[in-house]
Image (tube, rainbow, N blue to C red):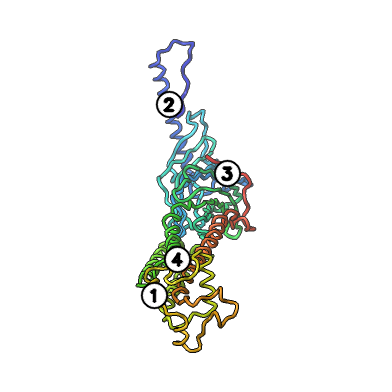
């Protein structure tokens, strides 16, 4: 509000009289300004460009955007939602007056009364992806400068790349377009509120500004690109860790006794649980992600391995129940004895102390090798049939011992492969997007601003 200084300290004038003089001057000034403003608006048209008819006069538009908050990034719908504040400034020489004569250096007026530049979203997620929060006023200075500020909630399309999920980095951008009027110069700056970008699932990394002028469509395009790193805690705890815990439990089925159906029951339960968690992870990822997320491929591989483990459990159960009248081949006898030495189980005796009770009873009832040889023609004593292998074969080895050996080998092998595989997987996922670059940096049409942004 403009205040006329009518107080002179050299005169002893009461304050109420000074206030009356001030009010009278203000009323006269406002009355003169209203008359002047009506004369200005009489020939004013908001549909015409401010520089229309002005020869070789360039119109300058200053656009300053400031991101207030990150509403969210929807990976499934590939939606990037933000709240932006726009500060626009330009000159309209048709709206000028004498501030000394009117006593009004500036005024505020409804935004629909004057000409305003058109700002559109170039990459909307849907047809109506820009929502204006409130109706705003424009500030008009006496020299024709106009300032317009408004807030919009913007939904833009973001191409989600979940290759290294849940340690991925996403580049989402907002394209602002405005028509290139005759001799139209645009100065574009952008600011951010870092505290407003502290989203629950995302961590702000950086942002860049690019510009492009499309001569064919007469559009000026300014692109604000943001880089966000996913916070992996939630997806790891809720989805990834439970899957690998279930997978790590599965090899323990080979510690269960072969009698009964405990092994098959546990294997099928884990297989179904992994299927459920695979569905949960798939629901968190976009359907059109290119390339396919590594974690999805890994889960499918583990699902196939779980299926193979189920088949091995069935084959091992069948091996365990092979009749004792079928002699174990010499190579398997050597493998059984060698495995027992590695696991410090000592010499094979009947009954074997480290086998289950059911296996001990079965081994105790074994007949000696001479009787077996008479029952099965052609199967002589393996120790005598294979010279020099007396220390590596035993007539007491049966298919139950072979089954037990397979259990030990599978447990050690699966856990070793799992540890190596998970270490490599974690390294690939964690470091995969650390050096990831924006696709905008490889475009020839877009020019990146060097230093044209500020942080709040």
Where is residue 322, by image quadrant?
A: bottom left
Q: CA distance from mark 3 to mark 4?
A: 55 Å
Give the percent coordinates (x, y) of residue 422: 52, 60
Q: CA distance from mark 3 to mark 2?
A: 42 Å
The local secondary structure at tag 1 comes to helix
Residue underneath mark 2: 26
Give the percent coordinates (x, y) of residue 424: 56, 60
Tag 3 near tag 1, CB within 8 Å? no
**Disc 3 or 2, which lies upstream in sequence?**
2
The image shows residue 236, relative to residue 337, as above or below, that is above
User: What quarter of the picture does the N terminus occupy?
Assistant: top left
Residue 362 tag number: 1
**Disc 3 or 1, which lies upstream in sequence?**
1
Q: CA distance from mark 2 to mark 4?
A: 90 Å
**Disc 2 or 1, which lies upstream in sequence?**
2
Q: Residue at x 58, y 53 (%)?
A: 434
Residue underneath mark 3: 453
Tag 2 near tag 4, CB within 8 Å? no
Q: CA distance from mark 2 to mark 1?
A: 113 Å
**Disc 1 or 4, which lies upstream in sequence?**
4
Of marks 1 and 4, the one in the foreground: 1
Of marks 3 and 4, the one in the foreground: 4
The local secondary structure at tag 3 comes to strand
Q: Residues within 10 Å of mark 4 (few under 14, many from 20)?
A: many
**In front here: 239 or 201?**
239
Whether residue 208 is visible: yes
Residue found farthest to the left: 260
Residue found farthest to the bottom: 377
Residue 251 tag number: 4
Q: CA distance from mark 3 to mark 1?
A: 81 Å
The local secondary structure at tag 2 comes to helix
């Amino acid at each position: 509000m403009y205040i006329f200084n009518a107080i002179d300290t050299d005169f002893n004038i009461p304050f109420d009289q000074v206030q009356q003089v001030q009010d009278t001057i203000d009323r006269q000034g406002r009355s003169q300004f209203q008359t002047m403003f009506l004369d200005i608006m009489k020939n004013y048209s908001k549909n015409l460009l401010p520089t229309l008819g002005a020869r070789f006069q360039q119109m300058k538009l200053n656009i300053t955007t400031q991101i207030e908050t990150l509403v969210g990034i929807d990976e499934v719908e590939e939606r990037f939602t933000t709240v932006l504040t726009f500060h626009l400034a330009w000159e309209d020489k048709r709206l000028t007056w004498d501030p000394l004569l009117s006593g009004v250096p500036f005024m505020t007026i409804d935004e629909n009364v004057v000409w305003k530049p058109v700002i559109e979203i170039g990459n909307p997620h849907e047809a109506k992806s820009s929502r204006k929060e409130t109706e705003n006023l424009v500030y008009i200075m006496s020299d024709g400068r106009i300032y317009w500020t408004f807030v919009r909630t913007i939904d833009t399309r973001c191409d989600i790349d979940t290759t290294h999920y849940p340690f991925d980095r996403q580049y989402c951008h907002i394209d602002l377009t405005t028509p290139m009027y005759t001799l139209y110069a645009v100065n574009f700056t952008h600011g951010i509120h870092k505290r407003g970008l502290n989203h629950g699932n995302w961590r702000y990394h950086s942002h860049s500004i690019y510009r492009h002028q499309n001569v064919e469509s007469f559009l000026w395009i300014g692109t604000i690109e943001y880089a966000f790193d996913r916070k992996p805690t939630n997806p790891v705890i809720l989805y990834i860790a439970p899957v690998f815990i279930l997978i790590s439990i599965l090899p323990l089925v080979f510690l269960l006794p072969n009698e009964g159906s405990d092994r098959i029951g546990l294997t099928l339960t884990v297989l179904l649980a992994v299927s459920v968690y695979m569905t949960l992870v798939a629901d968190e990822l976009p359907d059109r992600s290119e390339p396919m997320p590594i974690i999805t491929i890994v889960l499918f591989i583990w699902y196939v391995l779980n299926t193979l483990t189920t088949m091995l459990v069935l084959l091992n159960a069948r091996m365990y129940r092979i009749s004792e009248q079928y002699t174990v081949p010499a190579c398997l006898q050597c493998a059984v004895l060698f495995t027992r030495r590695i696991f410090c189980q000592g010499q094979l005796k009947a009954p074997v102390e480290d086998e289950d009770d059911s296996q001990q009873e079965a081994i105790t009832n074994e007949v000696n090798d001479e009787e077996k040889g008479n029952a099965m023609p052609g199967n002589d004593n393996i120790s005598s049939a294979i010279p020099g292998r007396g220390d590596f074969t035993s007539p007491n080895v049966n298919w139950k011992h072979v089954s037990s050996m397979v259990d030990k080998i599978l447990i050690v092998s699966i856990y070793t492969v799992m540890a190596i595989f998970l270490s490599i997987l974690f390294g690939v996922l964690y470091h995969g997007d650390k050096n990831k670059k924006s696709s905008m940096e490889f475009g020839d049409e877009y020019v990146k601003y060097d230093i044209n942004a500020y942080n709040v």
